[in-house]
């Protein structure tokens, strides 16, 4: 069997600490020594700064279903037909909450 190689004795902790201290000293001497200016506070009341505000990332949609178009149907009832014939007026069944612009867009889509 081959003889085992001798393990090197670990460096005593004192020499390691000294080397580390010298390295730190070198870094301090080499480093940039600048002073930060302190911000002047102009108000006696301290207001906490508004920090990082992330956008919401919802797990599910808050509305149960997508919004329908304001225009539903064009009825073919007697009264609707009478209006078309007599007054030359088109009749639509429209959503209660729809405004004129939404109705106009829905008619354009037809």
Image: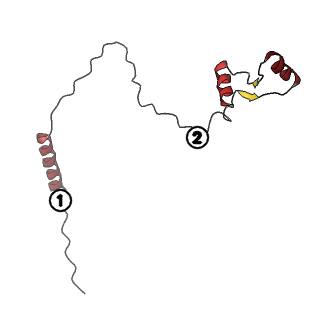
In the picture, residue 4 is in which quadrant?
bottom left
Residue at x 88%, y 23% (from the top left corner): 78
Numbered mark located on residue 12 in the image: 1
Residue at x 17%, y 50% (from the top left corner): 20
Q: Which callout, 2 or 1, points to the residue nearer the camera?
A: 2
Near mark 2 (Cα within 10 A), the count class, few <14, some 14-19 or many ≥20, is few
Q: Can you say which quadrant of the picture contains the C terminus?
A: top right
Disc 1 element:
loop
User: Answer yes or no: do the residues labelled 2 and 1 have beta carbons within 8 Å?
Assistant: no
Give the colour scheme of this rendering: secondary structure
Numbered mark located on residue 54 in the image: none
* Residue 8 coordinates in the image, percent (x, y): 18, 69
* Residue 63 coordinates in the image, percent (x, y): 65, 33
Disc 2 element:
loop
Q: Is residue 103 above or below residue 54?
A: above
Q: Is residue 26 above or below residue 96?
A: below
Q: Can you say which quadrant of the picture contains the N terminus?
A: bottom left
Instruction: State the residue in front, 16 or 77.
Output: 77
* Residue 11 coordinates in the image, percent (x, y): 17, 61
Q: Is residue 99 above or below residue 14?
A: above
Instruction: State the residue in front, 28 or 66.
Output: 66
Q: Is residue 35 above or below residue 4?
A: above
Q: Which residue is mark 2?
A: 59
Q: Earlier in the sequence, mark 2 or mark 1?
A: 1
**How many numbered marks does the figure carry?**
2
Instruction: State the residue in front, 25 or 106.
Output: 106
* Residue 3 coordinates in the image, percent (x, y): 21, 82
In the picture, residue 88 is in which quadrant?
top right
Near mark 1 (Cα within 10 A), the count class, few <14, some 14-19 or many ≥20, is few
Q: CA distance from mark 2 to mark 1?
A: 57 Å
Residue at x 21%, y 27% (from the top left corner): 36
């Amino acid at each position: 069997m081959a003889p085992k190689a001798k393990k090197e004795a670990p460096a005593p902790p004192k020499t390691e600490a000294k080397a580390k201290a010298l390295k730190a000293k070198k870094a301090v001497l080499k480093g940039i020594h600048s002073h930060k200016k302190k911000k002047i506070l102009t108000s006696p009341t301290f207001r906490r700064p508004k920090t990082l505000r992330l956008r919401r990332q919802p797990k599910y949609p808050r509305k149960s279903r997508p919004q329908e178009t304001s225009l539903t149907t064009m009825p073919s009832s007697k009264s609707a037909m009478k209006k078309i014939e007599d007054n030359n007026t088109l009749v639509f069944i429209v959503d209660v909450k729809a405004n004129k612009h939404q109705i106009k867009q829905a008619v354009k889509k037809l």
